[in-house]
Amino acid sequence: MIATARALFALCLVALMSCSSTKITDSWQAASLHRSDMKNVLVVGVSGNPTNRVLFERGFVDALASRGIKAEASFQAVGDAFPTRDAVTGYVRRNAVDYVIVTRLGDTEVTKERVPEQVRTYYTGPWYPTYADYWNTVTFTRDSYVDTKTTVVLTTSIYDVRTEELAWVGRSKTFEVGTVVREAGELAHQVVDRIHN
C-alpha cells in the first residue's frame, strides 16, 4: 500500500515537472541551418527590465549548455546597458560567434471569461452511527467572477553571423506572465528541438 502511494506520488511529481506553461506555436527554418553548426552562440534577451534580461539570458544559456551548445549571455558580452544592434554587431565581429539568438516580447494577449455562480451540496455522513438514515448536508456557494488570463507572446530569432541572415524564427506563448523569466530554459530546449539537422 505504501509502495503504491509512493509510486503514485512520484508519477504525479514527474507529470507536474514535465508541464510547461510555454509552448512554441509556429516556427520557420532556413535550409542552411543545422543544429550541429551551432558551436558558439550569443544569447540576447530584449527587455526593458535589466533584471529580467539577466535572468532570462542566464536560463537560456544554461539550457543550451546542457544540450552541448556553447553560449554566452549578452549582458556579459556587451554589458548591462540595453543591447543595441550596434553593440551586438561589434561584439560578434570581434569574437568567434556563429549564431545570435534574440528573444523579444512580441505582444500580450488578455482574455476574460465569466465563470457562473456555482452551488454544491455535500453529504457529510450520519450524525450518529445508529441513525444511518439521517445524513448531514452542507451547501457551498461560489459567487460568479471574471477569470482573466494574460498570455505573453515571445518572438525568438536566430541569425547566422556569417551571412547576417535570419536562419530560424519562432513564436511562443507563455500562459503565466510571472513565469516568463523562469521558462527561459524550457523555451531554449523547445527551440533546439525545433531545429532540424
Image (cartoon, helix red, strand yellow):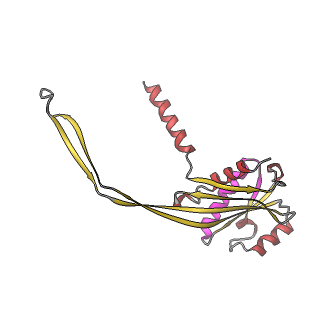
Q: In the current view of this chain or complex, which residue is farthest to the left?
A: 131
In which quadrant will I find the N terminus? top left
Q: Residue at x 64, y 54 (%)?
A: 187
Residue reaching furthest top? 1
124 sits to left or right of 197: left
Residue closest to the eye, 30 or 37: 30
- 29 vs 174, left or right, is right
Please say whether residue 68 is one of the residues in the magenta stretch: yes
In the displayed structure, 47 sits above or below 185; it is below
x%, y% of residue 24? 64, 54
Question: Percent x, y for residue 106?
Answer: 62, 67
Residue 133 location, quadrant: top left
Residue occupying the point 81% across, 71% down = 89
Residue 8 versus residue 190 in the image, above or below = above
Q: Residue at x 12, y 29 (%)?
A: 131
Question: What is the span of residues highlighted in magenta in the rendered image?
Answer: 49-71
Tally of numbered discs: 0
Q: Nearer the viewer, residue 101 or 90?
A: 101
Query: Where 153 sits versus 37, above or below?
Result: below
Where in the figure is residue 140, as x and y percent of width and height? 25, 49
Image-based side of 90 in relation to 193, left or right: right
Determine the main secondary structure of the stretch shown in magenta.
helix
- Please check the rendered image and state whether residue 67 is part of the magenta-colored stretch, yes or no: yes
* Residue 168 appears left or right of 150: right
Residue 173 pos. (x, y %): 59, 58
